[in-house]
Amino acid sequence: MLFSISRSAKALTIREVPNPLLNNQGWVTDMANLLSPATEAQLNQIISDFKRKTGNEIAVVTVPDTAPSSTPKEFAQALFKYWQLDRTNYWRFDGKGQNKGVLFLVSLTERRVEIKTSKSAMVRLSNARVKKIIQSEIIPHFKLGEFSLGIVLGTQALISSLSGSGTLPNDSLAGFYREAGLYGLIGLIVVVIRWGMVSASHNPSLQPEGRSRQHVYTSVKNKAAKCALCRQPMEKLDSQSLLSYLSQPEQVAQTLGSVSYDGWHCQNCYPNFNEKKIHIRAYIVNSTKFKPCSTCQELTVERTSTILEPATTKKEGQKLVIEKCHCCDYYQANVKTIPMLSDSYNSSDGGSGSFGGDGGGDGGGDGGSW
């Protein structure tokens, strides 16, 4: 029977990371679900404009983790070579020029950023410069859970360096600010000041009543909250008291580990216990293994994948994908096709080379944790 297969889902390998250029003529693969569709589209536009003007390319990839690779750096190096970002004849089909290829990788569980560059890119994008971009443009925003902004600003900083320009932002990035409600430089300064205040106080501000969500970020989650109205510290509910405010799907999600919840009460705004009003803060812990249930409206659907037949360079493969809600009776099992591997893939070295014969091998890169 097809549904009797119970092997656990395989860890992510570089072959299972969708190539955005081949899939949708884009530059972004967001497997960790850190980006909104609008932000992903904006990133694709920024990089496409850069590609059209210079012939150079940047691939932005987010993954939940990089197992079974021993480190995120090893995973980034392998993916960089597998996609042949160090070669002209893969990402650029005319075979001309010396393209500067860059891989911008974010591993959510390991809280790691890795940026891998071709040798030709190192002329303007040295390891020191990459490290500075990670530490100044990316990590500060990741520490506040602002993944979209950190990724966009990091991408733009890479583009500015490769273009020989120190200016930020450009017209395309301004579109992102408008999407985020940040109108021009004044809006950006206001947001930076707000982030600075949050960082300095280490206390997130919450409305005294309501609900909010964000991707899990330990240094924020473990800090006491302040009331956004009276600016006084809020009281955190104990786990038993919190349960009475959570719906059944929310309780299931917390048990599964897909979402973690905190409850906060402002005694200054609502001193009367009988009229106790609280703020429920949801932290998305795992949005890759789990997905929202259309009925339960929470991350209660677990997704597992089992390889039935691996793909090769000569034929497609198959995998069994099972989705099961742990809160209602939703269940679905489908056999899906795995695309054939690229003919240029070499299992021994992942496909090494360089753009336009600029010396052989790939260039450097750097990483950073948040």
Image: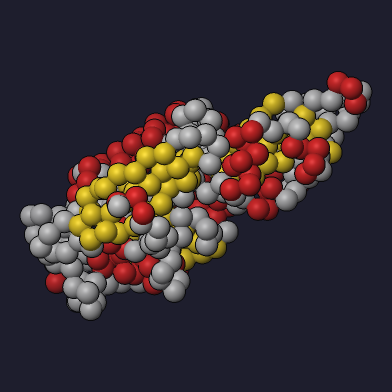
Please state the horizontal and vertical placement of residue 226, each as a whole percent of the image.
Answer: 78, 37
Q: Nearer the viewer, residue 207 or 195?
A: 207
The C terminus - image quarter? bottom right
Q: How is the image coloured?
A: secondary structure
Please state the horizontal and vertical placement of residue 186, each as a whole percent of the image.
Answer: 55, 31
Q: Residue at the location (20% across, 57% down)?
A: 317
Name the image quarter holding residue 117. bottom left
Q: Residue at the location (38% across, 35% down)?
A: 37
Count of picture labels: 0
Q: Nearer the viewer, residue 205 or 359?
A: 205
Please state the horizontal and vertical placement of residue 66, each as a whole percent of the image.
Answer: 43, 64
Residue 59 seen in this snapshot: no
Residue 249 seen in this snapshot: yes
- Outermost residue on the top side: it is 275
Q: Residue at the location (27% across, 59% down)?
A: 308
- Outermost residue on the bottom side: it is 348
- Seen in the image, is 120 located left or right of residue 156? left
- Seen in the image, is 26 located left or right of residue 137? left
- Seen in the image, is 236 located left or right of residue 71? right
Residue 40, placed above or below residue 127: above
Name the image quarter holding residue 357. bottom left
Q: Nearer the viewer, residue 320 or 239?
A: 320
Q: Residue at the location (58% across, 48% down)?
A: 256
- Outermost residue on the right side: it is 272
Please state the horizontal and vertical placement of residue 67, each as a whole percent of the image.
Answer: 43, 66
